Amino acid sequence: METPVNKPKQLRIALRNCGMLDPENIAESIVRDAYQALGKVLKEYSPQECINILKQSGLRGRGGAGFPTGLKWEIASKSKSDQKYVVCNADEGDPGAFMDRSILEGDPHSVLEAMAICGYCIGADKGLIYIRAEYPLAIKRLKIAISQAMEWGLLGKNILGSGFNFEIKLCYGAGAFVCGEETALIHSMEGKRGEPTNKPPFPATSGFMKKPTNVNNVETFANIAPIILKGPEWFSSIGTKNSKGTKVFALAGKINHVGLIEVPMGTSLREIIYEIGGGIKENKKFKAVQTGGPSGGCLTEKHLDTPIDYENLIAAGSMMGSGGMIVMDENDCMVSVAKFYLDFIVGESCGKCTPCRVGNKRLYEILERITQGKGVMKDLDKLKNLSYIIKDTALCGLGQTSPNPVFSTLENFYDEYYEHVVEKKCRAGHCKNLFHYVINEELCVGCAACKRCCPVHAITGEKRKPHYIDSNICIRCNECIEKCSFDAISIQLEPKILV
Amino acid sequence: MEMIELSIDNKVLRVKKGTTILKAARKVGIEIPTLCHMELHNMNIENKPGSCRVCVVEVDGRRNLAPACITEVTPGMVVNTHTVRVLNARKTIVELLISDHPYDCLVCAKSGNCDLQSIAHKFGIRRVHFKGEKSTYRKDTSPSIIRDVDKCIMCRRCEMMCNEVQTVGALSAVNRGFISVVAPAFEMNLEQSSCTYCGQCVSVCPTGALTEVDSTNKVLLALMDKSKTVIVQTAPSVRAALGEEFGLPAGTLVTGKMVAALRRIGFKYVFDTDFAADLTIMEEGTELLGRLKAHLAGESNAKLPILTSCCPGWVNFMEHNFPDLLHIPSTAKSPQQMFGAIAKTYFADLIGVKRQDLVVVSVMPCLAKKYECQRDEFKVDGNPDVDFSISTRELADLIKQSNIDFLNLPDEDFDTPLGESTGASVIFGNTGGVIEAACRTAYELYTGKKLDVIEFESLRGKEGIRSAKLDFDGLTLNIGIAHGLSNARKLLDDVRAGKSDYHAIEIMACVGGCIAGGGQPYHHGDSKILRQRRNAIYREDKNKTIRKSHENPYIIQLYKDFLGQPCGQKSHELLHTVYYDKSREEITIHHD
């Protein structure tokens, strides 16, 4: 794992132990204060007092939506039932995101401890971790951690002599993105099809096996112990007015230092990209950063100095999401970016509600038409209207946010859409139907190197005479440009009338 | 009960806490359109996945539109059901559904009965603004049901019926995203699943994704064949529902017109499955008494409870799910098959026609009957006892195709001898009816006394599982009744666990009995229709002069001339069957 450690501007709370200890040895965790918070809670606080601490801390869910964690626990604690459950959502599925994986692999006890604290607060004695089966190392380490914690009496019956019982089991997800939505996750754990249902009822009143269930994300749990040990005032002193603490992001894309970072809420995108991330690769021009995963949006130059927190990201047309952050430069086509995310959504929608199942497919098809140069101006209106209706009518969070990539690219990069549709031009040189390879007759010596390497025989010409590329056959593989020793071949963005 | 005040389209109303916006709106005369939602009142059947999103409404203060079918009212809620925002969303949703739907309404089996078609009509959709790829799947034909899931709109009604109401578990949503669809596991064929062919999925499917196998052409061809004598039998429930296909109010009895129409279509003899139902009672009732007497005499191999076996959906369910209990159902064939067996022996001889030249058609409220008549054990040298089984809907189609003015037909009587029946056989169509008919006969045969009151009210009702204790002159008979296969499963689980103290159990696969069978005219979620059909059946019983099976003069004659004793040797050859373990049938997965 490549984590830029000790860079300025970073502050590690959730990732505090990652890389610092052997996650397969509980003793090393305990040296670094694991289970201290659990002991303190069991000994010193009533469940409500502990919930109050969380409420004061201002911690909000790190899964994306940002619901206040203390309040969530309080609702679950007030639900009356003979059985309750604590569920850890480790179904991390955003493309390019691996925050939860890193925590589970590097510091599993921080999650187990927090789940036990949650169990104590809401009155649950059973915890379940819903983890995707594609994380074998995390699963292995969690299993070791659970059995060691059971051995040491930190999980199981009568924890630390308090009379409180808590056990944790693992449930494996089969890699469906939608199972990160809490009702879908619960159905999947119950052995049903992983698809969301209407809320209410919320899991806090009727969740796993129809019992009150508190679902939190891995990163949320990883923040619990430090809050208990250092106090809510410490935590709430970090961050912005409504978003406290830190956030882990997975930096990816056209940036010099990719990897996980953890920064205080309120850090600006500029600080993240240029100071922590070391700027754009090859000194190219920054174009956009995509945050919030497939349901998020693209932020631009004008957002670079916005302090990152839940509200600001939503106001800017994106969202916090689980923390994916993909940086794009001038070579990225924004229509194609929107298309990429829609493609992901079309495959990952559960297929239950019409707007998400069919609507997103139609959005994708419109975007595809545009990137192929077949778009018309009406398509842009259609995109906007359909996106609006999907957002307005879809059943769950996945569907309601699925048009966000379209909204934000339309909003911030309308001129690129316009160029694709009207000028049939992709300025990033990304959309294969919208650019051409041409041979400069004056520079071409007719060596036939390009002709020989062309996999589809698109190049013709006699020896020692200028060659010609047939755009109708060309697949834009770029092979000829690389082979040409005379710089005679270039990419032409302007549309060419095809015959 | 806490009451909640809200306003819908500026109308202020108070409703009970927990009411949905959809139901609250109905109270003030506002019909919010729905598609996936379906509710059969008082039958505990409700499908509300909130998946189609057609019923969305605007709620003040809410970020997005609310699905009316699953959103419960809250105090002070302000709902608007036809703002521009709502209408635009609704139309777009329907357009999206249509954009992924084959445009073959003109030749679709559901044309005229399709909920998607009527909603598109209602919304005035004249153009679909979205064009693109359509999801296509392999067409799946089974003996009873055709799945053409290109037309599936993922309303999940069939899935709810199959899993919750019937606990059959043959259908569920598979795949993700645009290609998700309702199908058997691994997208296998229905035939390879544990499907019982009860047809409840077909009766609730809003589109043409699930339809019955249409046998009307085969029937017409047989009718045209001069070398064949084609006869027909009609099940009790058909006469109580057929009229709906011709615009008559639900519950109109059209027995006489139906007979007249069948004759005009060209059937040589028009007979009644009710006759065979009387025969079933003779056999099943005798079997019950035999087993009961053995049980009372302390015989260890006396098998109780005895289960009715008239319902082919139920028999299929039993064979798939309770192979260890196959010794307890009555071995009596269903009335359809008894009729076929008698028609192709006794009656064929009577009119001097060879078995191969006699074609027996049955009109059934049921789709499982199509499968039943194709079972190998009901064939003699490859010739089936019943050649074709058509549904009530198919009969209506036949009548319409034959240019018959159904509503102005005179009433005509069934032919003899297989057309004479009693009130006992008519009530076979309702839940509790078979066991009531059996008890009418068993009581008199067992006690030797005349029944004072013919109606066993304690056996009637609509609860999914009912039980009654009947006094047979000092002997208390414990009767259990279940309709809907989930209820049947509960009773059977008890039997399996040795916790059941019933002597006899009646089971019908469909909730409500055959009147709500998978082959009946579509009810479109209106449970009033089912209630009317039920009442009509009891009315027909009341109108009959003979109301006990063993008093049917033609039944008496049949035993005298041909069969000998009930449960005698000849009966055993012709009227009884065996059951097979289908729980471990080899499963092969189709790849294409």
Image (cartoon, rainbow, N blue to C red):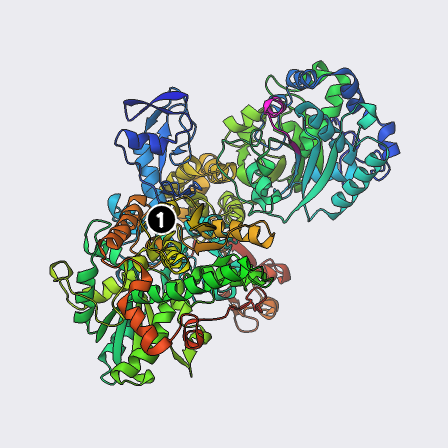
**Residue A476 in view (yes/no):** no
Chain under label 1?
B
- Residue bearing mark 1: B456
The quarter of the rendered structure image containing the N terminus of chain B is top left
Res. B439 image quadrant: bottom left
Percent coordinates x, y for residue B25 in the rendering: 31, 31
Q: In which quarter of the image is residue A244?
A: top right
For image coordinates 31% across by 40% down, the residue present is: B33
- Name the one closer to the observer, A417 or B172: B172
Vertical side of B414 occupied by A19: above or below: above
Element assignment for label 1: loop
Residue placed furthest toward the top: A233
> Which residue lies at the image location 37% right of the left edge and 76% below the top edge?
B563
Residue B285 location, x and y as percent? 41, 62
Residue A65, picture quadrant: top right
Q: Can residue A487 be seen in this view?
A: yes
> In this picture, is B310 found above or below B355?
above
Q: Which amino acid does label 1 sit on?
A: Phe
User: Depth check: B286 or B312 in front?
Assistant: B286
Query: How many numbered circles does the render carry?
Result: 1
Rendered residue at 73%/37% (across/down)? A168
In the rendered image, residue B462, in percent from the top left (x then y), is placed at: 38, 45
Left or right placement of residue A368 versus residue B426 in this view = right
| Magenta stretch bounds | A72-86
Q: Is residue B571 above or below residue A223?
A: below
* In front of the other: B527 or A466: B527
Q: Is residue B135 magenta?
A: no
CA neighbours of label 1 inside 10 A, class few (<14), some (14 to 19), many (20+): some
Going by the image, does B97 lie left or right of A72?
left
Magenta stretch: residue A78 in it?
Answer: yes
Residue B380 % position (x, y): 41, 81
